[in-house]
Image (tube, helix red, strand yellow):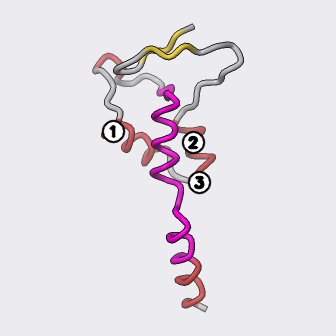
Amino acid sequence: MAKATDTETVEVTEEATPVTPKDLAEELGVDAKRIRAFLRQEFTRPGEAKNTSWFLSDEAATAVRDRFTPSEDEDEEMEDDDSEEL
């Protein structure tokens, strides 16, 4: 079964499970609404896709992970901020 994206068709096999914004939200600890907002800006879908489920390409899933995974510098800053509050 093939899933269409705005620029390409991605072949999904029975072994592959499509990744959704909800899956990534749970994985990354981020609100799914923030992920969908990012996707609307960076991976615009055709108008016909409005009000339908998102099934992400590998490229889109990687972009979401890159955007919402804190860098090591951000992790250190968060740790520093936490220690200042004590």
Count neighbours of disc 2 (C-alpha within 10 A) and say few if under 14, some if 14 to 19, many if 20 or more. Answer: many
Q: Which residue is mark 2?
A: 24
Q: Judge whether 59 appears above or below 85 on screen.
A: above
Q: What range is drawn magenta here?
A: 54-78
Residue 49 point in image, percent of width and height: 36, 20
SS type, badge 3: loop
Per the rendering, the mark at residue 29 is 3
Measured Cα–Cα span from mark 3 to mark 2: 8 Å
Q: Label 2 is placed on what type of residue?
A: Leu
Main SS of residues in magenta: helix
Q: CA distance from mark 3 to mark 1?
A: 20 Å
What residue is rendered at 56% in x and 46% in y? 25
- For image coordinates 31% across by 30% down, the residue present is 44
The type of residue carrying mark 3 is Gly
SS of the residue at dot 1?
helix
Q: Which residue is at 55% across, 90% downward? A: 84
Amino acid identity at mark 1: Glu
Secondary structure beneath dot 2 equals: helix
Query: Which residue in the protein does label 1 denote?
Result: 42
In the displayed structure image, the side of residue 32 where residue 29 appears, left or right: right
* First along the sequence among labels 3 and 2: 2
Across and down, in percent, residue 72 comes to: 55, 67
Badge nearest the viewer, 1 or 2: 1
The residue at the point 52 percent across, 83 percent down is 81
Decide: few, some or many residues near mark 3? Use Cα within 10 Å; few <14, some 14-19, many ≥20: few
CB atoms at circles 3 and 1 under 8 Å apart? no
